[in-house]
Image: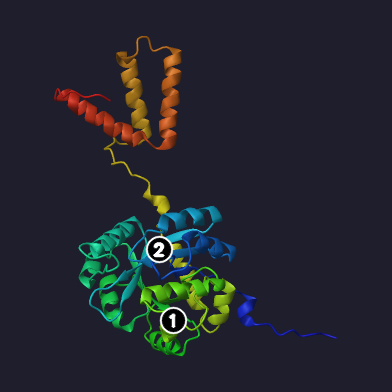
Amino acid sequence: MTTIVARNSVLDRVPGYAELHAASAFSFLDGAALPEDLAARAAELGLPAVALCDRDGVYGAPRFYKAAKAAGLRALVGAELTLQDTASPRLTVLAVNRDGYRNLCRLITAGAAGKAKGEAAVTWDQIGARAGGLHALTREERQLEHVREIFGGNFHVEIQRHRLRDEERLNRRLMELGLPMLATNGARYARITDRPVYGALCCLRLKTTLDQAGKLLEPNRERHIKSAQEMARIFADRTDLLEESVRLAERIQFTLDELGYGFPDYPLPVGETPASFLRKLTWEKASGGRFRPLDEKTKAQLEKELGVIEKLGLAGYFLVLWDIIEFCHREKILVQG
């Protein structure tokens, strides 16, 4: 006798999912998880990447990056920018490359300049001047005209599902626009059990009590980091939106790995690298009388030091320093180096 087992087609093949819109406790009173807790939970659930998008700042990004790297999770950088004089209060942007991170930091600085703490805000003109290297995420119909004009093809409409009737009506309207879309959960805490803490923080922000807050607070526990399996059940009709989140995460080049100091490019002769040119200069000077005699012990020491410099990628620094000292010698300027 053959037994036929019905299977849920959604669970036959769970699509990938990357959470591209999460906030930590660094979104003051609007997030209830430490960056380390978000990273740990996302890694535990097997997510490939998470974007930390705190409100008007990247303060939590270094801690999130460190924890994510240790857990094998890719940590992306973004922020929720508060918009000035608009009915659509925030725009989420992700840093795609180093230029984008630079522009994001400058936007955050511009938004805070001359304003009281907690009142940072940017204008659309400021965003337009610093949009390079940034990718926008929006759920607001009223933002779409500005977002399309400023970001061109570098934006997605966010579709979130928190089991709210009004939200689903908005989703249906957004889906009818034919614009690039992806799914996010807009996570505000790491685990479902963190919801009470988030509610208490929101009450502090809103200057009310838990008893009096009523509809000011979200009615359910849906803003935690969710697994791909959980999101696949919620988006059973549109799993392509989950897969699009992974595709965008893979296209984003920037992580805090790229923030090491970059030395100025030294103009090199054709066919030379910084390390090879430094090596050539070193042996020319050493053989030309710097060391008398140039014995085997000295050669071994120079070779050792050149090897360390090359391994650490510091040849460019030494070439720039050598160029400065050579200039001072030519101009008879006292110099030590």
Relative horizontal placement of residue 227, taking residue 128 as reference (left or right)? right
Residue at 27%, 34% in the rendered image? 320
The residue closer to the viewer here, 263 or 36, is 36
Q: Amino acid at mark 2?
A: Phe
Query: Residue placed at 49% from the left, 75% from the top?
Result: 223
Give the camera-side residue of 317 and 54.
54
Give neighbour class at mark 1: few <14, some 14-19, many 20+ (Cα, 10 Å). some
**Element marked by disc 2:** loop
- For the point 20% across and 63% down, the residue is 114
The answer to whether residue 63 is left or right of residue 144 is: right
Pointer 2: what residue?
A: 26
Specify the quadrant of the image occupied by residue 59.
Answer: bottom left
Picture quadrant of residue 12: bottom right
Residue 186 shows up from this direction: no
Percent coordinates x, y for residue 76 in the rendering: 43, 61
In which quadrant is the N terminus drawn? bottom right
Please say whether residue 82 is visible from this viewpoint. yes
The residue at the far left in this view is 331
Q: Quadrant of the C terminus?
A: top left
**At numbered mark 1, what does the secondary structure look like: helix, strand or loop?**
loop
Q: Which residue is mark 1?
A: 217
Q: Position of residue 271 (x, y in %)?
A: 34, 36
Where 333 sits versus 119, above or below? Answer: above
Q: Is residue 89 shown above or below 215? A: above
Report the number of numbered marks. 2
Residues at marks 2 and 1 touching, judged by CB atoms closer than 8 Å = no
Residue plotted at (80% across, 85% down):
3
State how the image is colored. Answer: rainbow
Marks 2/1: CA–CA distance: 19 Å
